[in-house]
Amino acid sequence: MRKVYLSIICMLVCSLVNAQSVKEKLINATNRLEKDTQMKHAVYSLLVIDEKTGNVVFDKNSQVGLATASCLKVVTSATAFELLGKDYRYKTDFAYSKNGDSVNIFIVPHGDPSFGSWRYASTKEEVIYKNITAAFAKANINSNKVSSISIVNKDFSRRFFPEGWIWQDVANYYGAGQGALNWRENQFDVLFNTGKQNANPQVSKLLPAYADININIEELKTGAKNSGDNTYAYFDPTNNQQILVTGSVPAEEKDFSISTTYADPVKYFSNFLQFYSNKNAGNNLSKPFANIHPANSLPADNTVFYTYYSPSLDSLVYWFLKKSINLYGEALMKTLAFEKKGFGATDEGVNILQDFWQQKGIDKTSLNIMDGSGLSPQNRVTTDALVKVLRYAKQQPWFSSYYNSFPEYNGMKLKSGTIGGVKGFCGYHTSKDGNKYIIAFLINGFNGPSASVVAKMYEVLNELK
């Protein structure tokens, strides 16, 4: 028995020594970070806790609200898992209303961000087209009798972009807005053929082919060979059917691709339906599909003849976190409001999120946010709040789906975040000696390139290995 007691005491002492050594290592590492020239005008916050006990291993500025960039996605996705459920599916209803011999078609979307996405077998555009046309046939809807097709948006805000998003972002693929209807993640690709450096690049094509947007390349240059994508896209405030592409594309490339945003999903979806109808010989739906327009209401005498369902929420969150798709975060925020209050608006979704976490002991003011994705530079969140959300998630039945969605950085399961002057990592790590940690690490206002800061953040996080 005495040997057992001695063994237990030894284990406890070793555990305390190890914890102290990790803390000391982090103190030394963060002291080095603070003296780095990139941190001269920066502020940072790092909180590390023991996953099992919740005891603080290291704390620096954990109560300071900072911009999170995409680290905010861990909060949005955890909230969605809790309030919507991992099996939640978006639906898009197709209904008809008869007016004598004619038929009016109404499509009622509910904010599905994955409709037409290339990421899932069931959402690919050719599959969706096949299902829609099959539903028309099954309902015996004669295309010659269809007088109109309307997209009905009665339950979602028409504000396509959240407050706080900046002009530099919103025309680029990662700044795609979100509406009741979304198509192909509201993005398309512009392909360029480029000549020698300093020559004028040329647009070779758009993908998909039905993305009929004018691309202005007056300010686009050809850079050095292998210089990569250094472009930014901007909406033309005088012409919503034109996008200005600036910056540079690499020399001597054929069909070099960049991605940008389609800001009129109703038109985009209409183009898709007409394009596929024209492409499929013998299909007579191209004429009614050409008449799609937005509408505010659904007639009372409508009959739903087809309902399309999205992949489940856990599948959406997988790509939301893995590929940091901002559109999905904005959809989830509006969906929280739609499901809980009956109308999908970002500000109400934010209120629901804050109220939920306040009930779990997280101060609302520590989750001072403008959106669901973290793209807004005005978001201010504490690492204390991030860590509390991550620890709460660890204890939930949906945790495996959540955890498996985290990317891996530096040998750790971490969600990263990047916007101008902001870099962050948060997530989970198990050290080689078996200790489990929950981590949130944010830096705002650093100088110089983000890649250099990342390397220095890794040096600090390596002390947990």
Image (tube, helix red, strand yellow):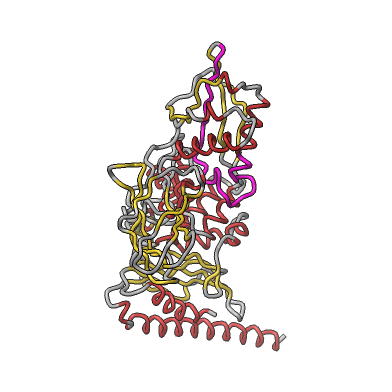
- Give me the residue at 39% from left, 68% from top: 196
Q: Nearer the viewer, residue 168 or 222?
A: 222
Q: Position of residue 317 (x, y in %)?
A: 55, 53
Q: Nearer the viewer, residue 52 or 303?
A: 303
Give the mark count: 0
Is 4 situated above or below 341? below
Q: Position of residue 458 (x, y in %)?
A: 46, 77
- Give me the residue at 50% from left, 45% from top: 209
Q: In this rendering, would 284 be left or right of 354?
A: right
- Give me the residue at 41% from left, 85% from top: 28
Q: Position of residue 440 (x, y in %)?
A: 45, 68
- Residue 306 visible somewhere in the drawing: yes
Q: Which stretch appears magenta?
A: 101-128
| Quadrant position of residue 347 | top left
List the single residue furthest toward the right. 1
List the single residue furthest toward the top. 100
Which of the image's four quarters has the C terminus?
Answer: bottom right
- Give me the residue at 44% from left, 78% from top: 455
Asked whether 121 falls inside the magenta stretch, the response is yes
Q: Nearer the viewer, residue 311 or 105?
A: 105
Which of the image's four quarters has the N terminus?
Answer: bottom right
- Residue 66 visible somewhere in the drawing: no
Q: In this rendering, would 190 be left or right of 140?
A: left
Asked whether 420 falls inside the magenta stretch, the response is no
Q: In this rendering, would 42 be left or right of 457?
A: left
Q: Nearer the viewer, residue 357 or 41?
A: 41
Q: Position of residue 245 (x, y in %)?
A: 35, 55
